[in-house]
Image (cartoon, helix red, strand yellow):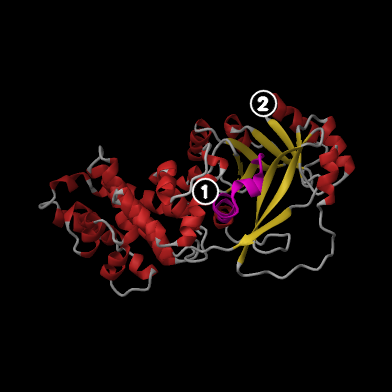
Amino acid sequence: MAELSMMRAEAAPLGEAPPRCEIDSLYIGRQPILTRDGALQAYELLFRESEVNRALICDDAQATARVVANAMCTMGMSATLGPHCGYVNVCRQMLFDDIVMLLPPERFVLEVLETVRIDAALIERIGKLRRVGFRIALDDVIELSEELRALLPQVDIVKVDFLAVDRGRLPALARALKAHGKTLVAEKVETGDDYALAQELGFELFQGYYFARPQVLSARRGDPSRQSLLRVLALIASEAPLTELEQELKRSPDVVMQLLRLVNSSAYGLDRRIASVREAILATGTRQIARWAQLLLYASSGVSWRSDPLAQLVGARSRFMELAAARVRPGSERFGDAAFMTGVFSLVHVLLGDAEPAASLEQIGLVAEIGDAIIHRTGLLGVLLTLAEAAEDGFQDEAAREMRLAHPELAVLTPPVFAEINLGAAMWAQAHKMA
């Protein structure tokens, strides 16, 4: 129990005056998760916006993105987790976002928040995440509802909330979960009696104020420019040569610093330190860099996808174009990706404060196929963008009729198909509200 005593010693005194928040610093909280004999097994990583040991979370997705960005890119996994695993809270939109794949599955447990809506799509998505190696935990469980029973086959770990659970039902709940072969974590354990009860009921892992309050880690803030990250994404989308991506990254020292931290972390299992941008790109891969760049944009303090109508419009437009592209050219994943990126960049001039798209796209250096589609409406991508804009005004059927003469492949976009695509795009944008 030596580690248990050490963890208790880390707890900050109650009533202590909160320290001042430094705007040039960033923070992350971590709380130990212990085994039955008191050994440290993992940390839960928690959102913090200052040295004050509490969180005011307005957006679950943004909070998770910041935790992941800080742990993976800024502070580094070695400083944040050491040799241990990390539990990270994930909301529904983060579960469906490709950004989650930035995390190395062998080091992170995805902790599904109790507020997440459970349906067939979620169960399927969690199944896919488990197949690539992620372990899934359920957070703040107090009873085994029918929804949770449906999800349980895709879950590895269940965290039971000892502050909220009905003590009379706790033994039966523990037995039922253990019968399903789940690892049980007693969380929010605040007294010795709670700890003794959890041990008696067969809980394997323990977390709570009885052992330690969350410890707040801090580091100086590095805020890569939005324009640089957009250019990196544009280069990757255009399948630019390695040398071009290397040169773009070198223009932003903060971005390079975070990339090197990421690739030198234990996430990549490299047996040597990476010291150059070129080596970092080769070791990481452009797909992983794209996820990482999206994450940093996602975690920034810029546009709020939850409240900003422009950002919601971009999300719905991009998905509309991707779904339409899949109907027009069902065998071309590359065309679908290009259609989605066309939607993303079609309003980037508004995000960057430019009057016209051409100025923004020129400074980003976007691939000509996508740039011409946005500025001149050329090619099939330009046609799909025009249809997407018409759909926003409710006139996509009329626009499609006019364009079918020049583009016979649009014949597959019938009114019922448009209705399905519109619904799918709206639902996707709602589910993927970003930071």
Disc 1 designates what residue?
262
Q: Earlier in the sequence, mark 1 or mark 2?
A: 2
- Look at the picture and state if 104 lies above or below 242: above
Along the horizontal axis of the image, is 18 left or right of 276? right
Along the horizontal axis of the image, is 212 left or right of 265? right
Could you tell me which residue is drawn at 38 percent across and 48 percent down? 424
Measured from the top left, where is residue 431 in percent x and y? 47, 51
Measured from the top left, where is residue 278 in percent x and y? 39, 48
Name the amino acid type tagged 2: His
Viewer-nearest of discs 1 and 2: 1
Disc 2 designates what residue?
180
Along the horizontal axis of the image, is 192 left or right of 224? right
Q: Nearer the viewer, residue 189 or 170?
A: 189
Within-10-Å neighbours for mark 2: few <14, some 14–19, many 20+: few
- Look at the picture and state if 70 lies above or below 362: above
Q: Is residue 338 magenta?
A: no
Could you tell me which residue is drawn at 51 percent across and 55 percent down? 258
Could you tell me which residue is drawn at 66 percent across and 59 percent down? 218
Which image quadrant: the N terminus?
top right
Measured from the top left, where is residue 195 in percent x and y? 85, 39
Q: At numbered mark 2, what does the secondary structure look like: helix, strand or loop?
A: loop
Type of secondary structure dominating the magenta stretch? helix
Q: Nearer the viewer, residue 359 or 150?
A: 359
Along the horizontal axis of the image, is 231 left or right of 34? left
Could you tell me which residue is drawn at 81 percent across and 46 percent down? 7
Image: magenta residue range: 66-85
